Image: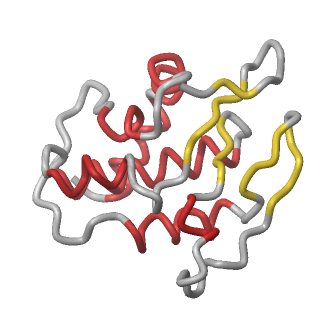
Amino acid sequence: MNTIEIYNIIDLEYQDWIDVGFGKWIHGIFLRGGDKVFTFDEQKESFFYLLKKLLDDNKVVLFAPYSMFNENTSQWDKTVAIRKYGDTIWGLPSKEIIQYMRDVFPKDAKDENDDKVYDFWFSEDCPQIGWVDKKTGEIVTS
């Protein structure tokens, strides 16, 4: 499946992704495959696309990864924090956040069940997600 096809699937099932994923940890939108069966590479691409779309549409916010506050962090140590929805969130543009996610996602993982992928979701490199409640405007986290 090519990238355009993956994006079209996400776009068609977008509201379902929101309804099913709302309030879940960030890996919840990674593991959700919709009605299609994606290869692992397609699954990663769909995750990055969906996460960017959710950020751009103000459906979710991300909190800077704990590793950002580590003195040994290199290019990503210039965290921009902003106040939004009553919380301090990661203020980088979505394009930069997605690039960060691509950079830190385990490169040698073989599938979604790989321990490296599982460990990543709970690592200091993975940002925490907050879902914006459309009725109250409050951030919901798990």
Residue at the spot x=65%, y=78% of the render? 77
Answer with left or right where residue 105 lies relative to residue 98.
left
Residue closer to the observer: 49 or 106 = 106
Residue at the spot x=59%, y=46% of the render? 53
Farthest-out residue, top = 135
Residue at the spot x=53%, y=84% of the render? 72
Residue at the spot x=85%, y=34% of the render? 85
Residue 119, placed above or below residue 100 = above
Q: Which scheme is used to colour this image of the protein?
A: secondary structure
Answer with left or right where residue 17 lies relative to residue 55.
left
Q: Quadrant of residue 90?
A: bottom right
Q: Where is residue 91 shown, x and y percent of the image?
A: 77, 59
Q: Where is residue 73 shown, x and y percent of the image?
A: 55, 81
Q: Where is residue 132 shown, x and y percent of the image?
A: 71, 28
Residue closer to the observer: 115 or 45 = 115
Q: Where is residue 138 shown, x and y percent of the image?
A: 79, 23
Answer with left or right where residue 125 lies relative to residue 118.
right
Answer with left or right where residue 47 lies relative to residue 33.
right
Farthest-out residue, front = 71
Residue 7, placed above or below residue 41 = above
Q: Quadrant of residue 140?
A: top right
